[in-house]
Image (cartoon, helix red, strand yellow):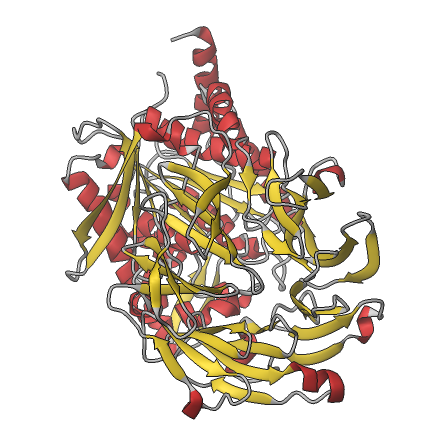
């Protein structure tokens, strides 16, 4: 061992022996549906509105200092950072949007902290910078979250936010001159459709940026005062639908029709058709019911004189219905693409002459081309087994396909939908060889006998000797699918002999709406059982052992990671728990979390309280005395999941862990310049991945001694 390593470990050992900062106990007991529930760290939520107090800020500073004293001094940090930096600096590029003769896209190159908006006049022409947020502030915390070009490509609306707060402000820019127009709209704004002549656009915003349940659909005419923009539709103010994500809307290409939707849950929404011309001429919002009050999720694509409606109504795997716009009553509906067993419709795209369906089969993508009567023309060729998305325009048969897989760098292909001819449009250069890793998909049995699929990724030639360091990553919620994705920083993990495992847990969307329902509300325990079974499969099949197995989860996946901390701490040596939900009895009282009551339930309901209390990680800590090492990380500006969850859970485990802090440290990092993760600059992302990777390598015995 070198003197430097000895010195580094001495600093870490000293910090560990001193232990984490103390957290004052201020227990509050309340009776919920007849049961006494005590919260020892309620004060770490902040004031009555969840805003940080001086006391909480001081406690957070102490926790951050403790965490940095350990993570910054672990041996090998500089080497790991130097290894991961070039993998983080690989270019990122998005699929272009074609408007007029211009191709708009985002790209982050090399050391840039934030992605820049570019455009080209031809598919492979000169790239021209349109919006560069990197020049706006020294910390590079401004982010372009979205953009929407006008039909002729002459104007571009775009949304920016700061330090990950996701409160987008809408700006307009003249593409030719690069000058901003005076039109500016505040309030978490998202543009959703231009009129063909570029004279105005549809958008949604919050009436009150501090009230996430106040979304409005509005229309802006260029040059008008934005405060005078008319409200077309707004979030319900009363009843159970007043606290969902509320309304969303977009226009047909010709501006004649508006598709209006209203989220009624995390897997359901109502949808209507609105004659937008009529509204513009008379101010009358005449809603034609499409699917209202049903247990289904539905979205529509306009094409000429028809609406092509994707829906899960009586079709858990999705189907497509063709609706004539001039006579949209249900008697005139035509089901053109029926639901298919073991094949899930994820999205539909329309071009000038074709309808393309993104299917998901065993958690991988297939793209199938149809005519507009539902006749199959054939599958679109993809580079391999992975995840693909297609971008197509109403007035062209030119399309762009983004493809990625664990061992295939994210690549964008330009395709002629008439001929199927495909050419590479962009693929960032990478300093690694994807062919060095092996990808496989296995199936294992969960507690109740359900078969679960899981992706395994590792270096070729891996020996199954039961000692491979392994990261188990899971999500399992909100109909979100975990599909193959190229993650450059994992190649350091693979070179170090590590395994990366991604199970397709119930609650996700990999196998349709029924799969989602099987992991929500009172069936959430299925998700935890699926994850536990995945860990046991990895151990029983010679991939790893409990001393070399780590768990990682973010957001809803942070809830999953928290459940593993309390349910099966014996299975894991370390857990990385990012921006997590952990107090499931109070989560819905903060920020936008009432959105998620249809997914989880609410402790305000006596029956839902029972199952939430039974698994809420924060309330299960007292039943566990020996914990794995845990790294909690959150963002102070998170507008989705309140940082209180990580604060309270860290304090509770630090105080209640029977294992010495020197053996099973519990660390908390609260980043003051980030939110839920969106918009974090490259430098912060690099520090985050180094922190997490070094922590896991340390706890899994991969650092030099």
Looking at this view, is 221 or 175 the one in front?
175
Looking at this view, is 129 or 231 the one in front?
129
Residue at image point 61% right, 68% down: 212
| Name of the residue lying farthest toward the front | 419
Residue 359: percent from left, percent from top: 35, 60
Residue 55: percent from left, percent from top: 63, 48
Q: Is residue 583 left or right of residue 120?
A: left
Residue at image point 33% right, 24% down: 496
Residue 371: percent from left, percent from top: 41, 69
Looking at this view, is 272 or 506 the one in front?
272
Q: Is any atom of residue 469 visible in this view?
A: no
**Up/down of 3 relative to 345, above or below:** above
Assign the N terminus to one quadrant of the image: top left
**Up/down of 246 relative to 501, above or below:** below
Q: Is residue 118 left or right of residue 389?
A: right
Looking at this view, is 600 or 13 the one in front?
600
Residue at image point 31% right, 49% down: 564
Quadrant housing residue 330? bottom left
Residue 127: percent from left, percent from top: 66, 39
Assign the C terminus to one quadrant of the image: top left
Residue at image point 46% right, 32% down: 19
């Amino acid at each position: 061992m070198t003197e430097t390593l000895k010195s580094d470990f001495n600093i870490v050992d000293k910090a560990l022996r001193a232990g984490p900062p103390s957290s004052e106990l201020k227990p509050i007991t309340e009776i919920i549906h007849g049961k006494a529930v005590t919260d020892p760290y309620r004060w770490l939520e902040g004031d009555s509105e969840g805003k940080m107090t001086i006391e909480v800020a001081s406690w957070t500073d102490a926790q951050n200092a403790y965490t940095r004293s350990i993570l910054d001094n672990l041996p090998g940090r500089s080497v790991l950072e130097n290894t991961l930096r070039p993998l983080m600096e690989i270019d990122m590029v998005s699929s272009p949007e074609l408007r007029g003769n211009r191709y708009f896209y985002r790209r982050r190159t090399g050391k840039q902290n934030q992605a820049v908006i570019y455009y080209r006049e031809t598919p492979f022409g000169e790239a021209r910078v349109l919006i560069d947020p990197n020049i706006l502030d020294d910390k590079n915390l401004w982010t372009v979250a979205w953009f929407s070009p006008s039909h002729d490509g002459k104007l571009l609306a775009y949304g920016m936010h700061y330090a990950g707060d996701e409160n987008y402000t809408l700006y307009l820019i003249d593409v030719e001159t690069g000058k901003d127009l005076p039109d500016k709209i505040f309030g978490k704004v998202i543009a959703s459709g231009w009129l063909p002549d570029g004279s105005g656009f549809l958008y949604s915003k919050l009436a009150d940026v501090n009230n996430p349940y106040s979304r409005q659909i509005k229309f802006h005419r260029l040059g008008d005062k934005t405060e005078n923009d008319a409200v077309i539709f707004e979030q319900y103010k009363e009843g159970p639908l007043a606290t969902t994500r509320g309304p969303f809307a977009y226009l047909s290409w010709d501006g004649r029709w508006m598709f209006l939707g209203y989220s009624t849950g995390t897997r359901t929404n109502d949808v209507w058709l609105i004659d937008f011309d009529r509204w513009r001429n008379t101010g009358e919002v005449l809603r034609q019911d499409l699917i209202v009050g049903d247990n289904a999720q539905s979205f529509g694509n306009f094409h000429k004189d028809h609406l092509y409606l994707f829906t899960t109504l009586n079709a858990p795997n999705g189907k497509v219905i063709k609706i004539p716009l001039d006579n949209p009553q249900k008697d005139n509906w035509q089901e053109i693409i029926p639901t298919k067993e073991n094949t899930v419709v994820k999205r539909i795209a329309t071009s000038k002459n074709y309808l393309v369906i993104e299917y998901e089969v065993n958690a991988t993508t297939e793209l199938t081309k149809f005519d507009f009567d539902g006749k199959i023309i054939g599958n679109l060729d993809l580079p391999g087994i992975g995840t693909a998305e297609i971008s197509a325009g109403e007035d062209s048969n030119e399309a762009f396909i983004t493809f990625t897989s664990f061992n295939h760098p994210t690549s964008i292909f330009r395709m002629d939908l008439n001929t199927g001819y495909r050419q590479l449009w962009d693929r960032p250069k990478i300093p690694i060889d994807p062919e060095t890793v092996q990808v496989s998909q296995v199936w294992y049995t969960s507690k109740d006998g359900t078969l679960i699929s899981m992706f395994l990724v590792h270096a070729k030639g891996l020996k199954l000797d039961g000692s491979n360091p392994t990261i188990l990553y899971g999500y399992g919620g909100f109909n979100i699918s975990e599909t193959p994705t190229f993650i450059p920083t994992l190649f350091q993990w693979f070179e170090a002999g590590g395994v990366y495992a991604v199970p397709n847990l119930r609650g996700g969307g990999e196998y349709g709406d029924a799969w989602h329902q099987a992991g929500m509300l009172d069936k959430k325990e299925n998700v935890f059982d699926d994850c536990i079974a995945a860990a046991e499969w990895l151990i029983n099949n010679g991939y790893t052992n409990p001393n070399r197995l780590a768990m990682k989860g973010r957001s809803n996946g942070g809830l999953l990671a928290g459940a593993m901390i309390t349910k099966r701490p014996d299975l894991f040596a370390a857990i990385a728990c990012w921006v997590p939900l952990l107090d499931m009895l109070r989560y819905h009282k903060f920020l936008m979390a009432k959105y998620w009551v249809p997914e989880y339930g609410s402790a305000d309901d006596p029956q839902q309280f029972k199952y939430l209390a039974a698994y809420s990680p924060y309330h299960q800590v007292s039943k566990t005395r020996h914990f794995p090492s845990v790294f909690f990380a959150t963002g102070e500006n998170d507008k989705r999941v309140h940082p209180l969850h990580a604060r309270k859970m860290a304090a509770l485990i630090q105080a209640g862990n029977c294992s010495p802090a020197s053996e099973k440290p519990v660390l908390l990092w609260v980043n003051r310049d980030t939110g839920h993760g969106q918009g974090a600059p490259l430098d912060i992302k690099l520090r985050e991945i180094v922190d997490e990777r070094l922590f896991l390598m340390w706890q899994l015995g991969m650092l030099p001694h």
